[in-house]
Amino acid sequence: MANANTTALASALSKAMANIHQRGWCDGTGGNFSCVLERDPVVLLMAPSGVDKGSVAPRDLIQVSETGSVVAGKGKASAETALHLEIVNSCGAGAVLHTHSQAGTLLSQWALQQGSAGQPLERGHLELRDLEMMKGLEGVKTHACSVQIPVYANDQDLDSLSLRVRPVLADAPHGVLIAGHGLYAWGRNLGTAVRHLEILEFLLEQRWRQLLLEALVQRPQTASATP
């Protein structure tokens, strides 16, 4: 990490990860975070796998090639690097941020449990609508609209998962959910990606609270209708 641009990006990514960890969105060793260091060929600046993302210093970051190999730094690249690379290549993203928040994990599972006959779906979506905070997503100009976050079943084969997710990435609202696993958010640069992550996490938090409130409101009616 010799040049000034790399040093500045490493410092910014380290700070962003610490802030995300502090908000409880990547507890333990959860989450993985990347920024594009070079485009041709792609080189990602990432946190190594299996470490507490709240305490990764700039010097601890690794550089990962477009084949997923570590080309600088010490540590192992996350198995989920394949999905980071797919998002970068499909969306032109400059940063990809993956969180394991309670809201994202809960709602991603719930969204795929809405299949017929109680059978979980392999893919689905989570609709968010009519909220002022949606205007924090690039391209959204009014609260009077809806966005659909794609949701996919989890898969330990990240190459396979990346191929399945690829067709929806370009039209996704800067985020995709993996069931029981959490949110991937991205942006054209790190600052935009952080903003999209914060907005989407707010919307996810609001959605599960809304579902809970609706259930509480309906409960007395159900109880009174019981003979």
Image (tube, grey):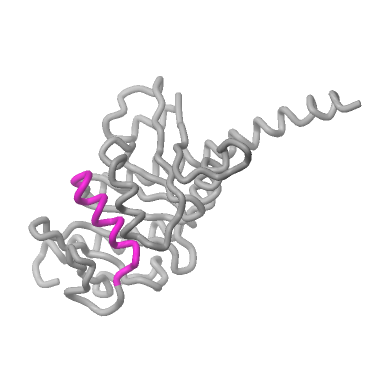
Q: Residue at x 39, y 73 (%)?
A: 51
Residue 199 drawn above or below residue 145:
below
Q: Residue 24's spot in the image, x, y percent? A: 49, 57
Give the left or right position of residue 44, taking residue 102 as reference.
left
Residue 146 appears in the rendering: yes
- 62 with respect to 120 (left or right): left
Residue at 52 percent of width and 37 percent of height: 206
Residue 225 coordinates in the image, percent (x, y): 84, 23
> Residue 200 appears in which quarter of the rendering?
top left
**Viewer-closest of 168 and 50:** 168
Q: Specify the farthest residue to the bottom.
A: 74
| Residue 80 is a magenta residue | yes
Report if residue 87 lies within the magenta region. yes
Q: Is residue 23 shown to the viewer in this render?
A: no
Which quadrant does the C terminus fall into?
top right
Q: In the drawing, does residue 40 fall left or right of residue 214?
A: left
Q: Nearer the viewer, residue 166 or 192?
A: 166
**Front residue of 129 and 9:** 129
| Image quadrant containing the N terminus | bottom left
The location of residue 29, given as percent across then percent down, is: 44, 68
> Residue lying furthest top in this view?
144
- In which quarter of the view is residue 173 placed? top left
Q: Residue at x 43, y 50 (%)?
A: 178
Q: Taking 147 as reference, is 38 above or below it?
A: below
Q: Main secondary structure of the magenta part?
A: helix
Label count reads: 0
Magenta segment boundaries in residue numbering: 77-92
